[in-house]
């Protein structure tokens, strides 16, 4: 039978075959459908790139029987919070403002968050049309300090959308920026949505969550949700594939290797995982095999490896090619070190053979701090290097096949105060969030460098920041020490693009992450400070880093 999509329905008249376009797909209100056949037919009309959801299916086996090859029972649980009890506290966490969607830029900001979490993006035209409808609400969490959107949630009023006689509502697509240093963003969004629907006289708020997402389940239980009965059915498509196929071998890989392996499999390229802990795998296609360690491949020669790993050689080669680099010298006697410090005023101290931001001290200004920084660098990676400190934004540019593919500003880890918690607690909380968001790749060390950074601001681990006050806890912006990354590929100045491609050709390395210090990504001023022979491609989504990487290795699969 034909199925008619409806966007909203008067609250006093229940609709039949009720569906709501949500921007990422359609929400099907299963109790309004006349038969399991009608539900199945509606799900089979799902559009490409969308994710339709049939909610509150009473007899899922009958729906699945209509199209067993195309539909599946979603392995999610339904949770419900009653809204007809005590008043709900809707006070937002310190440092954020909760507000409704008001501009087209808000839609783009939500899609940025969705991309970071690999969620289905919103269709801007659908969302813009819906923004004034009483059936749908998009709430945003805005960082009061930066103005950035760092969280979002969608709410559906079932009375307005479907004529629901039970007076229900539901929550969808809760997302929080995994890089924010502000705690309580997700809780604030959920409480605000609960309070809004409570004020409207609705009886409950439902949500669907994967059965093994213990972190999310714990959060919802903390907010007063309890499991309730109900089934959800979805369409078998590429987006939902992990839900009905199950986990893959990629579960043993870190995010940087898994991104590449998944892209290879999408292209029909054979994959043999050799050492999941080290991120080593072999790719095979058309009689050719390439062994990789994440983004490092056999195409990178031994000389290129040496040039990248030895930071002295890196800058020497780049300077010879006419690229701008900071002054640098090897750590020597206390007198020589002090003289280099006096000449430049502030230094960066790093291990000559280090990686992942280990052992680096930035903006060192006193002889005592310099001695401590040299000792830390030597412990992390052999001889220490002293480098002229050049202030500016930390810019990572990824070059693949000698062409720029992605660029991102990297910012040091910082935390926001709540007026109660000491800095040690705030750092540990933020470190745990970054660690979870990066698959265990990011961690903020509580070490001498963190202590030095806090001391430069007149703080220590026992300090309590005022509500909304910020503190930078590391000077380096490396992701492995808690830094955050913000895509600026579209804004990259042509001179920076040209410099990055020249640097890759100079080092003769086909896949490289180049670290620049810049006044701004859209301005030409720069210095190049490092080259990374194994850049983390997953850090630059949604830029097509894995696609261009695979194009380089197996061009006929593009």
Image: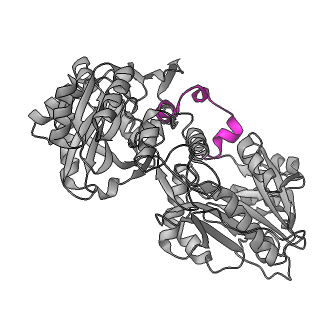
Against 495, residue 158 (above or below) is below
Quadrant (top left/top right/bottom left/bottom right) for the C terminus: top left
Against 51, residue 250 (above or below) is above
Asked whether 252 falls inside the magenta stretch, the response is: yes
Identify the magenta region.
237-260
Q: Position of residue 303 (x, y in %)?
A: 22, 19
Q: Position of residue 434 (x, y in %)?
A: 55, 42
Q: How is the image coloured?
A: one colour
| Residue 466, picture quadrant | bottom right
Asked whether 152 falls inside the magenta stretch, the response is: no
**For residue 308, side relative to residue 278 (left or right):** left
Residue 46 appears in the picture as rendered: no
Q: What kind of secondary structure does the magenta stretch mostly adopt?
A: helix
Pick whichever, 301 or 2, lies toward us: 301
Residue 44 appears in the picture as rendered: yes
| Residue at 43%, 45% in the rendered image | 455
| Residue at 33%, 40% in the rendered image | 362
| Residue at 45%, 33% in the rendered image | 448
Quadrant (top left/top right/bottom left/bottom right) for the N terminus: bottom right
């Amino acid at each position: 039978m034909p199925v008619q999509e409806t966007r909203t329905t008067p609250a006093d008249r229940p609709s039949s075959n009720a569906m709501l376009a949500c921007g990422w797909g359609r929400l099907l209100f299963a109790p309004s459908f006349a038969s399991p056949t009608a539900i199945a037919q509606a799900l089979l009309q799902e559009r490409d790139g969308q994710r339709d959801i049939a909610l509150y299916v009473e007899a899922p086996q009958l729906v699945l029987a209509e199209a067993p090859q195309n539909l599946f029972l979603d392995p999610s649980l339904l949770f419900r919070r009653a809204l007809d009890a005590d008043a709900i506290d809707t006070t937002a966490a310190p440092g954020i403002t909760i507000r409704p969607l008001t501009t087209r830029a808000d839609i783009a900001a939500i899609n940025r968050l969705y991309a970071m979490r690999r969620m289905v993006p919103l269709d801007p035209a659908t969302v813009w049309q819906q923004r004034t409808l009483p059936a749908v609400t998009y709430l945003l969490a805005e960082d009061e300090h930066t103005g950035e959107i760092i969280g979002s949630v969608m709410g559906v009023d079932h009375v307005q959308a479907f004529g629901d006689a039970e007076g229900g509502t539901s929550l969808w697509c809760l997302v929080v920026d995994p890089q924010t240093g502000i705690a309580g963003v997700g809780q604030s969004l959920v409480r605000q949505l609960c309070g809004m629907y409570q004020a409207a006289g609705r009886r409950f708020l439902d949500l669907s969550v994967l059965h093994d997402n213990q972190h999310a389940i714990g959060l919802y239980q903390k907010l007063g949700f309890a499991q309730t009965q109900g089934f959800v059915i979805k369409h078998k498509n590429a987006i939902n594939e992990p839900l009905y196929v199950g986990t893959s071998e990629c579960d043993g890989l870190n995010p940087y290797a898994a991104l590449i392996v998944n892209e290879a499999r999408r292209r029909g390229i054979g994959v043999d995982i050799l050492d999941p802990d080290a991120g080593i795998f072999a790719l095979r296609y058309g009689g050719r095999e390439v062994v990789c360690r994440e983004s490092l491949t056999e195409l990178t020669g031994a000389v290129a490896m040496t040039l990248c790993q030895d930071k002295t050689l890196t800058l020497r080669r780049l300077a010879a090619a006419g690229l701008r680099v900071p002054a640098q010298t090897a750590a020597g006697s206390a007198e020589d070190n002090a003289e280099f410090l006096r000449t430049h005023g502030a230094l960066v101290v790093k291990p000559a053979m280090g990686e992942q931001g280990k052992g680096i001290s930035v903006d060192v200004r006193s002889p005592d701090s310099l001695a401590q920084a040299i000792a830390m660098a030597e412990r992390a990676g052999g001889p220490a290097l002293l480098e002229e400190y050049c202030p500016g934004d930390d810019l990572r540019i990824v070059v693949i096949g000698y062409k720029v593919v992605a660029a991102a500003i990297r910012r040091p880890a910082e935390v926001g105060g709540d007026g109660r918690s000491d800095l040690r607690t705030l750092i540990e909380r933020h470190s745990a969030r970054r660690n979870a968001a990066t698959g265990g790749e990011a961690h903020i060390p509580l070490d001498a460098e963190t202590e030095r950074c806090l001391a430069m601001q007149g703080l220590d681990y026992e300090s309590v920041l005022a509500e909304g006050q910020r503190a930078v806890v590391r000077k380096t912006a490396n992701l492995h020490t808690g830094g955050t990354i913000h895509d600026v590929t579209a804004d990259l100045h042509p001179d920076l693009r040209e410099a990055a491609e020249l640097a890759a050709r100079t080092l003769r390395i086909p896949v490289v992450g180049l670290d620049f210090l810049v006044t701004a990504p859209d301005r030409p001023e720069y210095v190049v400070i490092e080259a990374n022979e194994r850049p983390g491609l997953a850090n630059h989504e949604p830029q097509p880093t894995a696609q261009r990487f695979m194009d380089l290795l197996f061009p006929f699969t593009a």
